[in-house]
Amino acid sequence: QVQLVESGGGLVQSGGSLKLSCTASRFTLAHYAIGWFRQAPGKQREGVACSDSSDGDSNDGPIDYADSVKGRFTMSRDNAKKMAYLQMNDLKPEDTAVYFCATDINCRAPEDMGYWGQGTQVTVSS
């Protein structure tokens, strides 16, 4: 059964940085899309960044970013290590949320992604 485990969340001041990691197991990551999503209190879950499946160990496929994080967040994946990462720079209080990684055959809307991790809390203080 697909398993995803996020790590790296925490408390950071506005303007700071964090790097999230997602460890994938029990499936071949290269054959699947993997994405980062977030949910702030009282808000719907939203997409942050998503990478469609890539051939073999190629980690250079295109990545789609939400407009709100473009230029600040960078997603990467390492299919051989079965890892995905989200480097978050210049964090803002509005980035505060629980961050999830999720996987499916293709990048999809949050409600359509099939497999999810448990999430990691990111809190940005002003």
Image: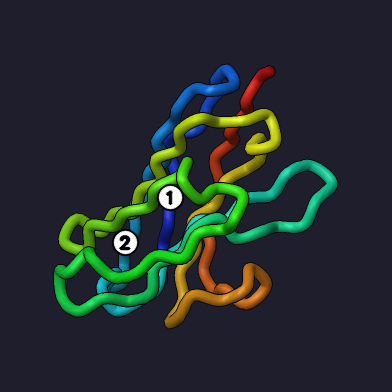
What kind of residue is marked 2?
Ser
- Name the residue rendered at 39%, 65% in the picture: 63
Question: Total marks drawn?
Answer: 2
The local crowd at label 1, few if under 14, some if 14 to 19, many if 20 or more residues have their Cα within 10 Å, is some
Given residues 14 and 82, the one toward you in this image is 14
Disc number for residue 5: 1
The answer to whether 47 appears left or right of 24 in the picture is right
- Name the residue rendered at 55%, 31% in the picture: 91
- Name the residue rendered at 39%, 36% in the picture: 19
The answer to whether 86 appears left or right of 78 in the picture is right
What kind of residue is marked 1?
Val
Residue 112: x and y in percent read: 62, 77
Residue 30: quarter of image: bottom left
The answer to whether 35 appears left or right of 113 in the picture is left
Query: Label 1 near label 2: C-beta < 8 Å?
Result: yes
Q: Which residue is mark 2?
A: 25
Given residues 40 and 15, the one toward you in this image is 15
The answer to whether 5 appears left or right of 15 in the picture is left
Residue 97: quarter of image: top right
Label 1 residue SS: strand
The local crowd at label 2, few if under 14, some if 14 to 19, many if 20 or more residues have their Cα within 10 Å, is some
Of mark 2 and mark 1, the one earlier in the sequence is: 1
Q: CA distance from mark 2 to mark 1?
A: 9 Å
Image quadrant holding the N terminus, namely bottom left
The residue lying furthest to the right in this view is: 42
